[in-house]
Image: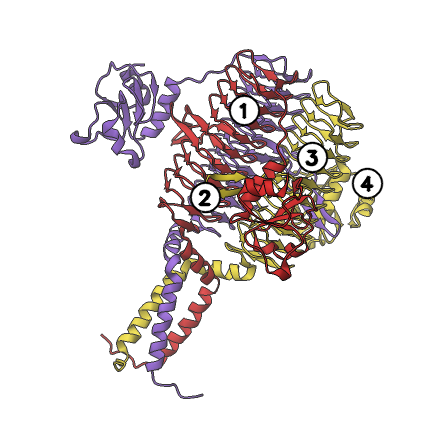
Chain colours: A red, B purple, C yellow
Amino acid sequence: MRADALAAALGARLDGRPELELRGVAGLADAGPAELSFLANPRYRRQLRATGAGAVLLRSAPPAAERPGATLLLIDDPYAAFAKAAALLHPMAWPAPGVHPAAVVHPSAKVDGATVEALAFVGPGAVVGPGSWLEPGAVVAAGARVGAHCRLMAHSVVAAGCRLGDRVWLNPGAVVGGEGFGFAPTAAGHQKVPQLGVAEVEDDVEIGVHSAVDRAALPRQRTRVGAGSRLDNFVQVGHGAEVGPHNLLVAYSGLAGSARTGRGVVLAAKAAVMGHLEVGDGARLGAASLLLRDAQPGEALAGVPAVPHAAWLAQAAAAPTLHEELRALKARVAALEAAAPRPEPR
Amino acid sequence: MRADALAAALGARLDGRPELELRGVAGLADAGPAELSFLANPRYRRQLRATGAGAVLLRSAPPAAERPGATLLLIDDPYAAFAKAAALLHPMAWPAPGVHPAAVVHPSAKVDGATVEALAFVGPGAVVGPGSWLEPGAVVAAGARVGAHCRLMAHSVVAAGCRLGDRVWLNPGAVVGGEGFGFAPTAAGHQKVPQLGVAEVEDDVEIGVHSAVDRAALPRQRTRVGAGSRLDNFVQVGHGAEVGPHNLLVAYSGLAGSARTGRGVVLAAKAAVMGHLEVGDGARLGAASLLLRDAQPGEALAGVPAVPHAAWLAQAAAAPTLHEELRALKARVAALEAAAPRPEPR
Amino acid sequence: MRADALAAALGARLDGRPELELRGVAGLADAGPAELSFLANPRYRRQLRATGAGAVLLRSAPPAAERPGATLLLIDDPYAAFAKAAALLHPMAWPAPGVHPAAVVHPSAKVDGATVEALAFVGPGAVVGPGSWLEPGAVVAAGARVGAHCRLMAHSVVAAGCRLGDRVWLNPGAVVGGEGFGFAPTAAGHQKVPQLGVAEVEDDVEIGVHSAVDRAALPRQRTRVGAGSRLDNFVQVGHGAEVGPHNLLVAYSGLAGSARTGRGVVLAAKAAVMGHLEVGDGARLGAASLLLRDAQPGEALAGVPAVPHAAWLAQAAAAPTLHEELRALKARVAALEAAAPRPEPR
């Protein structure tokens, strides 16, 4: 692909050789003359000048002294442009449709136009849409529905009656539709609450390795992951919870049962939302935070329990020395008390 | 099922139509005239009046103005009663016994009366009890024993020599008997300590998606999960640890090696018990807490490191403003010092 | 094995019966007269005197009054010696090479000298080295390479193009080569960044149940786990991250994308290293800590955010009473202010 065609496709301004042929992408330190790289994180700025890349996506041209030999593609968001360029230059190989003889597809299931690899399983009444790809060990259980152009990697599971939209990507071991954690404490022990609902994942969602979206407890209810959301590894979406559209749930983050997030919410790594809470559109929870109250739209929160992010930063910065400062202040107060006139006895 | 029969089965007092036919359960917002719903969490009280449910389980009759049209079933613990009702009205479909031709069962294994689905595996010398159900990808390894009426969902694993009691339910990907994390640091690196014991899960336990109960390190020893305990997703029970009976271990919580919990312990989400510690009967650890000392029976603890829950609450409430209060107090002390008579030089 | 031969093999000093025959290892409380036990953790010292073990590894001979009947094997590091002794007395049974008829091995794959159990999968062009052992459900995807004498337990996955060195042990469900979590936020949603690199695990690494080592984002780059490192359950190594040699990563700990650790680093349970950070050789992160800056070689850090371990200990010890101490001090300052002469108005 020529640099000028790529720049046009990305909406970038080209500063250099329009006729340059680009065959792939690579990191600044690795890229060769037929490869495109990018600079987005200032941490890697010093790699820019020495790069052997044929072209580099970046925000603005560097000063002449730091300018690499590469053709520059200037754009406001070089990382997003790089993502698009990588998809253009490295189109994903998708296998031809067909059912491997060592796959197990129930006669009542529909898998027309899908790829079902060896040792994958499709249960009775299940439907797998055209262009979808089931890798070895993928399980689509009885009555489950998988849309078109999904990828179910090794050992991912869509449990009975659960649903995936189109272009959903399940990483290895991701489970949609495990049992919700519903138990009522009684004198005789924890009585299981039958989990009678389903789990549903909307279009264009990716779910990371081993992440778990539990089925809802109640009939006709569903646990939901909204369109375009991206879940990292080890993420949990509890029973009856709803993840809004275009959320980012980073590794080990999760929602307890019946919690809900709005549109464009971000849970950083290990952030947890307790049960039945609401997280407003665009709210952000910091890493390792624990949300114990509703979050308003646009709020940025952090800490255990979560408080406004700025307050958490100030608190965290002060915390390590607080006890020493307090001790020093106590000594000053004691000195003042020693010097002060005795108050009259009451 | 008639409302009066259901009320009798649950021990509830009926206030309404005894002859009402109930065919299932549903949430307050969804339920129809032949369905039973419940109100336990006050958060959902406003849904009560408008519900279309034929009957509702709740603690006490609402004031006349808020009373729904539904028949009321009054009981002290409506959530536990709902759990029982749901099990009565939605009896679980259990497959007929038999071994699918695409299952792999070693000739020396015993699986009489069990259901072994396609792509499940039962190794040499393993025993699976009557009425147990192995879903696709379930693995019962060499010499392992699974009791009666267990359900091993997709890709759950009972590793070599490990044991499940009766009515144990493993969610997708749950692993009983992975290697314990035992390594002795030496000059040449971390020397592996062979993990020679087993893991054992007692009767009536449910284990969540991807949770891991590691095997014990020492021969004749076992990691144990006590009868009636309920483990959520991503729970770890380290090697040689013992979870007592009727524990609740919420998502991402866990015990490190050789830790022990008593009866009826609750670990909230992400709570962690460090190695070799003891947690007494009925103790409770708060979400995201880290236990670094033994917990006494009945103690409620929270925080990192865990302290009594009330102390943690007070500390957490004060923490965000503590540094500002200290700064303000410093200013007041400085003003006092400026106004105070100079102490004589020593 | 005779006690004197074992002592010689371990480098221990024998105090007792050289001719004693030892047939296995066991815990102090369980061991019989033909078994070797050990005492390393002082918590178990009281079990020493009553032990029925034929021999015990320990640091130094106890006082005569506490001395058990056992032969003593005295050595500086009894736990490491026990690990070696256990491996000598309980040599691991390794299955004979061969491919089970219910395994699926692509004709273009090479598995000479390996054991491939039923329901394991080896994809096109993959290579599995001699002496390696694939348990049921193990997946070695297209073009992946597994070295010699590896053990891939049930449902572990080596994704396309990824590599394991020699003697690597993957616990059940461990995944090497899941998709990295790479998404660029755009107005139209989170644009996926194609994950074009691989993941590579060097020699003598063990990876725990369900742990995930994601593939790198960029072509020719790799996520790496260094030789001799030991990863517990639920550990994440993000895309492009590098775990140095001989690290210990305890349960639920992990590195975000492009983070790097040096040699001999320890991440305690639930410790997290944020993206692009560097952790120097021998640094240690405490349990449940969150690293937000680089860690210097040898640093011991703890807390959220992580601070030097000693500072964290002092802070944690003071924290529960800090707000009460501050309140008390405020009262003393108020008393001083009430007693003090009014400052002149400015």
| Residue that mark 3 sits on | C161
**CA separation in Å, label 2 and label 4:** 62 Å
**CA separation in Å, label 1 and label 2:** 31 Å
**CA separation in Å, label 1 and label 3:** 30 Å
Q: Residue B248, image x and y in percent?
A: 46, 36
From the viewer's perspective, is residue B280 above or below residue A336?
above
Dot label at residue C2 = 4
The one nearer the camera, A138 or A7, is: A7
Instruction: Give the amino acid type for the residue marked by disc 3 in the picture.
Output: Gly
The chain holding disc 4 is C
| Residue that mark 2 sits on | A266
Label 2 close to label 4 by CB (< 8 Å):
no
Q: Do the dots labelled 1 and 3 sit on one chain?
A: no
Q: Quadrant of residue A43?
A: bottom right
Q: Do the dots labelled 4 and 3 sit on one chain?
A: yes
**CA separation in Å, label 2 and label 3:** 31 Å
From the viewer's perspective, is residue A316 above or below residue A211?
below
Which quarter shows the N terminus of chain B? top left
Q: Quadrant of residue B285?
A: top left
Which quarter shows the C terminus of chain B? bottom left
**Residue extending farthest bottom:** B345
| Residue that mark 1 sits on | B153
